[in-house]
Amino acid sequence: MAIAHQFAYQKVATLDEAVEAITRAGPDARILAGGTDLVPWLRDDAIHPDLVVDIKAIDGLNTISLEGDHIFLGPLVTFSDLLTSDLVHDHLPILFEMADTVASPGIRNRATVIGNICSAVPSCDAGPTLLVLDTSVAVLGPAGARTVPIEEWFLGPHKTALAGGEIVTGLSIPIPPPPHGAIYLKLQRYQGEDLSQAGVTVLVTGDNDFRVAFGAVGPIPARAHAVEETLNGRELTDELIAAAVGLVPGAISPITDMRATKEYRARICEVMLERGLPAAVARRDGTGPAYGTRLI
Amino acid sequence: MKLPITMIVNGETWPLDVEPNEVLLDVIRNRVGAKGAKIGCERGDCGTCTVLFDGRSIRSCLMLAVEADGHEIITVEGIPENGVLSNLQDLFISHNSFQCGFCAPGIVLGAHELLRDNPNPSRHDVQHALAGNLCRCTGYEPILDAVMAAAEEARS
C-alpha cells in the first residue's frame, strides 16, 4: 500500500537548518532519521506532516564518543551501532544487551536510539535502560540549546518534553562508577520481530545503589523509586528480593492489549525483577552471565 | 513535487524522479523492475522486502525512495555473479529450504550479510540474524541447515 498523504521533503546540512525548517513549517513537521516508525505511521495515515526533514546528510551525527565519564550518542546512532561499538562494550555493556533485543538486523541497521525515545512508544526498548543510567537528552530549538533529564522526557504514549521546533541533538549517558552490573530483561511472545510485553532494567553499583525501571507496563517507561529505596545500601538477600518484588504492583500500571493481559504483565514483572536483581549483582561481581544472555 | 534522485541498483545507475511519499520498495519493484524484493507486511515485521543498502540489510518497505539518493542497493537479483548462483543459494536449493519462496529473497540477503560479517556463526547466531524473516512453509530448520552448511564450506 502506497503512502496516500502528500508532503514536502527537505534534506538539511546542519542542525540549525533542521530547527529552522521545522520551526517555519509548524507543528506538523517531522524529523526523518531511521524512518522505521515514521514511514509506517505515514502509511497508516496516523500522522500528516506538511514537511519531512531528513537529517541524515548532516555530518557527524552518528558519533559514539567518550567524553570524560560520559558516553555521548549522536542522533543518527543506530541500534546496530551500539552492538558494534567498543566504547559501548567496554563502558556500558547494558546498552549492547538492550540493543540486541530490538527487532531484527534489518531494523537495527536503520532505527536510531534517539528516534526510539522520540517516538515514545510505551514499550520502547531504550526507555528503561536510559532511565536507570540517568541519561541527559540534549535538545536544540529556536530559543537555543537545553538539556532534559530522561526522567522528565516521557510525558505519555507518543508524547515527550520536546517543544515545537526542537530536535534532539544527542544523549549524554553517565558511566556508573565501576564496578557496576546491569541487566535488561525483555519478555516477548517469541524471540524475533516482536515488541516488549514487559521489560525491566536493573542497575547496581559497588555500594549497592540500585536503579530499576520498567517498560511496556505503563503509559511511559518509568523508574521504580519505591523499589530502589527498599534496596539501596543493602546487601541483596532472598528476603530483600522478596521485599522489592512485593513493591512491584505499586510501581507499574499495565494494560491488556493484543500482546498480553494486564494480569500476566503484572506477574511477569515480579518474576523478572526476582531474576534480574541477583543477575545484575552477579554481573557486578564478575560472576554473572555474559551481557546478551537471555534470562527469560 | 517530484525530486530527482540517483541510486545504484545491482550495479546499474538509476536516475529517477520520485515523489516524497514514494516508498523505496515500490520504486525498486515498479520503476527499476527488480521484483526480488517482495511486498509482505509493509510494516517491517516480515523481512521479505529486505535489500542491502550500502551493504547492510534494511527493510525497503520502511524507507522513502528519496532517502536512497546517492546510495547503493543490492536486491536478491544482485547476489549471483555472472548469472551463477552463490554457494549459499545452491545450498538453500539442495536443502529444500524454501517451498513457496516468498521469504527467500529476504533470507538470502540476511544470510549473505551474516556470513560476510561473521564467517563462523553458531546456529543461535543464524537464528538471531534471521529472526526478523518470517517463513510459513518449511519450519526454518532447512534454512538454518543451509546457512550452517554454507559457513562450513566457506571455512574448508
Image (cartoon, helix red, strand yellow):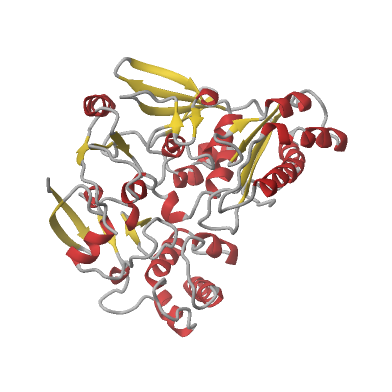
- The residue closer to the viewer here, B72 or A209, is A209
Say which of A139 and A288 sits in front: A139
Vertical position of residue A36 compared to residue A170: above or below? below
Q: Residue at x 47, y 72 (%)?
A: B154
**Displayed quadrant of residue A65:** top left
**Residue B16, position in %: x, y?**
13, 56
| Above or below B108: residue A50 | above
Residue B9 visible in the snapshot: no
Q: Residue lying at the far front in this picture: please name it.
A: A256
Q: Is residue B19 left or right of residue A100?
A: left
Could you tell whether A196 is left or right of B65 in the image?
right
Residue A33 percent coordinates (x, y): 34, 40
Instruction: Name the residue furthest right.
Output: A239
Q: Nearer the viewer, residue B27 or A171?
A: B27
Q: Residue at x 17, y 63 (%)?
A: B31
State the image coordinates of residue B3 (x, y, percent, origin top left).
Answer: 13, 47
Which residue lies at the image location 60% right of the left edge and 47% below the top edge? A256
Along the horizontal axis of the image, is B71 left or right of A96?
Answer: left
Q: Is residue A207 above or below residue A271?
A: above
Whether residue A68 is visible here, answered yes or no, is: yes
Q: Residue furthest top?
A: A143
Judge left or right: residue A244 versus residue A135: right
Q: How many marks?
A: 0
Find residue B122 and report its horizontal and vertical position in percent.
Answer: 58, 64
**Is A155 located above or below residue A113 in the figure?**
above
Which quarter shows the N terminus of chain B?
top left
Quadrant of the rendered image containing residue A273: top right
